[in-house]
Image (cartoon, rainbow, N blue to C red):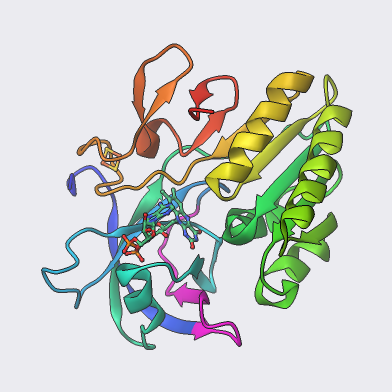
């Protein structure tokens, strides 16, 4: 890892709370002394991880303020399982802020399309940006109370749709398509969520001629452009590193292999 060019801070765990749904975790670290833009991410690695977990893990910044650096994550494997067990006072190495962020256009409607833990970067966005011209459609699988949805819905016009069946997913896609079409020529969408959802968002943006930005969660090892672990392809066939050229891309530039 290129630690000479990437700011690394040693932060302390202030709280780590799996809620009533143990796979979703709200982690707050001590204030990092920097600020960032919504869509940027950090690489984090607890100092006590041994050689079996060499690489840090990437997470969107959910929020950052004097109260600390907040990450909202889902337990999916070894690293996130260990992160979920962090205790207050433990030390974590944090590289960041990294990557490119969502560009808001204050003068036109901006529709957030978030899926599952893809809601994380929009907590900071809703708190910081002017709330006019910003709205959200949120698709989720688990009960709404497990996500930081209410924090966003308190500030901007928001709608949530739960998907537990194939019919729910189809209904969500129909609403998504309609919303994206409505913004054609007059606004843009900002999307973060599972790759199948991003493919749908991209397809409808291109179909309806609507501007859009999507945040990709390609697997990453270094986070700073040094390992080629996160490459994706542009529509012109070039390979780009998602950690430095993204993770937020214009839908017209990136090929998701649909
Ligand atoms: C820029 C960026 C921002 C991210 N922000 C968040 C966030 O805010 N909240 C959150 O919960 N997660 C986020 N992720 C995904 C998160 O980094 C991975 O879930 C995590 O690294 C998995 O680590 P693990 O050791 O638990 O999983 P592993 O043991 O490495 O893998 C377990 C399973 O998870 C899958 N997996 C691993 N990494 C990813 C990934 N990046 N995307 C999809 N599937 C993956 C693997 O294929 C495997 O099936 C982000 C990823 C990126 C690149
Ligand atoms: S994660 Fe290493 S180049 Fe992007």
Q: Is residue 200 magenta?
A: no
Whether residue 103 is visible to the viewer of this picture, yes or no, is no
Q: Is residue 145 left or right of residue 67?
A: right
Could you tell me which residue is drawn at 48 percent across and 75 percent down?
28
Q: Is residue 49 left or right of residue 30?
A: left
Q: Is residue 222 left or right of residue 57?
A: left
Q: Position of residue 180 (x, y in %)?
A: 80, 33
Give ligand 2's quarter of the image: top left
Locate the C terminus by quadrant.
top right
Q: Which residues are magenta?
A: 17-35
**Residue 156 occupies quadrant:** bottom right
Q: In front here: 1 or 53?
A: 53
Residue that sits furthest to the top in the current view: 236
Q: In front here: 113 or 108?
A: 113
Residue 146 higher or lower than 109, as above or below: below
Residue 71 higher or lower than 158, as above or below: below
**Residue 252 occupies quadrant:** top right
Could you tell me which residue is drawn at 72 percent across and 55 percent down?
166
Whether residue 196 is visible to the viewer of this picture, yes or no, is yes
Residue 108 higher or lower than 92, as above or below: above
**Residue 80 occupies quadrant:** bottom left
Residue 149 higher or lower than 247, as above or below: below
Could you tell me which residue is drawn at 67 percent across and 71 percent down?
142
Q: Position of residue 89 (x, y in %)?
A: 34, 87
Q: Position of residue 157 (x, y in %)?
A: 87, 54
């Amino acid at each position: 890892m290129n630690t000479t060019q990437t700011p690394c801070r040693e932060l302390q765990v202030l709280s780590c709370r799996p809620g009533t749904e143990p796979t979703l975790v709200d982690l707050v670290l001590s204030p990092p002394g920097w600020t960032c833009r919504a869509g940027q991410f950090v690489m984090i690695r607890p100092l006590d991880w041994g050689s079996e977990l060499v690489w840090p893990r990437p997470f969107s910044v959910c929020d950052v303020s004097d109260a600390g650096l907040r990450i909202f994550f889902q337990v999916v494997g070894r690293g996130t399982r260990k992160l979920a067990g962090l205790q207050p006072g433990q030390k974590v190495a944090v590289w960041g802020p990294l990557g490119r962020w969502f560009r808001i256009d204050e003068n036109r409607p901006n529709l957030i399309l978030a899926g599952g833990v893809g809601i994380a970067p929009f907590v900071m966005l809703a708190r910081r940006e002017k709330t006019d011209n910003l709205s959200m459609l949120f698709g989720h699988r688990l009960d709404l109370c497990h996500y930081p949805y209410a924090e966003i819905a308190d500030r901007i016009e928001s709608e949530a749709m739960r998907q537990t069946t194939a019919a729910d997913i189809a209904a969500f896609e129909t609403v998504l398509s309609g919303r994206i079409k409505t913004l054609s020529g007059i606004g843009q969408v900002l999307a973060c969520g599972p790759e199948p959802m991003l493919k749908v968002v991209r397809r409808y943006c291109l179909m309806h001629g609507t501007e859009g930005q999507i945040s990709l969660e390609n697997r990453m090892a270094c986070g700073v452009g040094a390992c080629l672990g996160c490459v994706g392809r542009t529509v012109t066939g070039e390979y780009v590193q998602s950690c430095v050229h993204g993770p937020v891309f214009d839908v017209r530039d990136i090929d998701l292999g649909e």
